[in-house]
């Protein structure tokens, strides 16, 4: 029995890669079943561990996404402040020029 899988380069391919490796492990275990016993409890525990790590990965990615959005928002706020400062400086310059014309 063989598993064949083709996945294009995808930065989000970790879940598929894990699913492939788990399926491959199950097939290898089935083919070796006559030669050795598999600790099913340990296998289930390891799969649960993988699921937990995937959940943590999703949580971290979500947190990073939120951080990036906050950084972008802060960058926009800074640009707005810079524009405001430039406008105020223009107003000051106009006031000084008007005063000199009098």
Image (cartoon, rainbow, N blue to C red):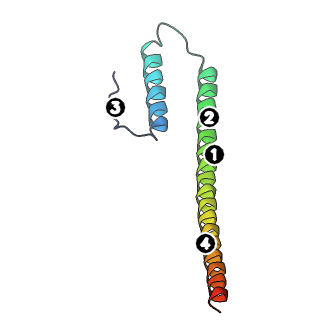
**Crowd class of label 2 (few under 14; some 14 to 19; many from 20; radius 10 Å):** few
The residue that mark 1 highlights is 59
Query: Exactly how many numbered labels are in the figure?
Result: 4
- Give the alpha-carbon distance from disc 1 to disc 3, as whole Å: 27 Å
What residue is at 61 percent from the left and 72 percent from the top? 86
Nearest the viewer among 71 and 13 is: 71
**Which marked residue is nearer to the observer: mark 1 or mark 3?**
1
Q: Position of residue 101 (x, y in %)?
A: 62, 90
| Residue picked out by circle 2 | 53
Which is more N-terminal, label 4 or label 2? 2
CA separation in Å, label 2 and label 4: 49 Å
Residue 63, x across and y down, in percent = 64, 49
Q: Nearer the viewer, mark 1 or mark 4?
A: 4
Q: Residue 5 got which mark?
A: 3
Query: Which comes before the other along the chain, label 1 or label 3?
Result: 3
Q: Are the residues flagged by discs 2 and 4 in contact, CB closer than 8 Å?
A: no
Residue at 44 percent of width and 38 percent of height: 13
Q: What is the distance, in whole Å, between disc 2 and disc 3 at their CAs?
A: 23 Å
Which quadrant does the C terminus fall into?
bottom right
Image position of 88 with respect to 42: above or below = below
Secondary structure under the numbered disc 3 in the rendered image: loop
- SS type, badge 2: helix
**Which of the two labelled residues, at mark 1 and mark 4, occupies the earlier sequence position?**
1
* Residue situated furthest bottom in the rendering: 102
What mark, if any, has residue 86 been given in the picture?
4
User: Spatial distance from mark 4 to mark 3, Cα to Cα?
Assistant: 58 Å
Decide: is 82 above or below 61. below
Q: Which label sits in the foreground, 4 or 3?
A: 4
Q: Secondary structure at mark 4?
A: helix
């Amino acid at each position: 029995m063989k598993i064949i899988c083709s996945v294009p380069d995808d930065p989000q391919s970790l879940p598929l890669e894990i699913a492939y490796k788990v399926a491959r492990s199950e097939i290898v275990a089935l083919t070796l079943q006559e030669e050795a016993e598999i600790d099913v409890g340990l296998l289930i525990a390891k799969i649960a561990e993988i699921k937990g790590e995937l959940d943590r990965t999703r949580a971290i990615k979500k947190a990073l996404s939120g951080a990036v959005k906050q950084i972008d928002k802060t960058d926009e706020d800074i640009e707005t402040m810079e524009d405001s400062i430039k406008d105020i400086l223009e107003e000051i310059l106009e006031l000084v020029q008007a005063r000199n014309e009098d």
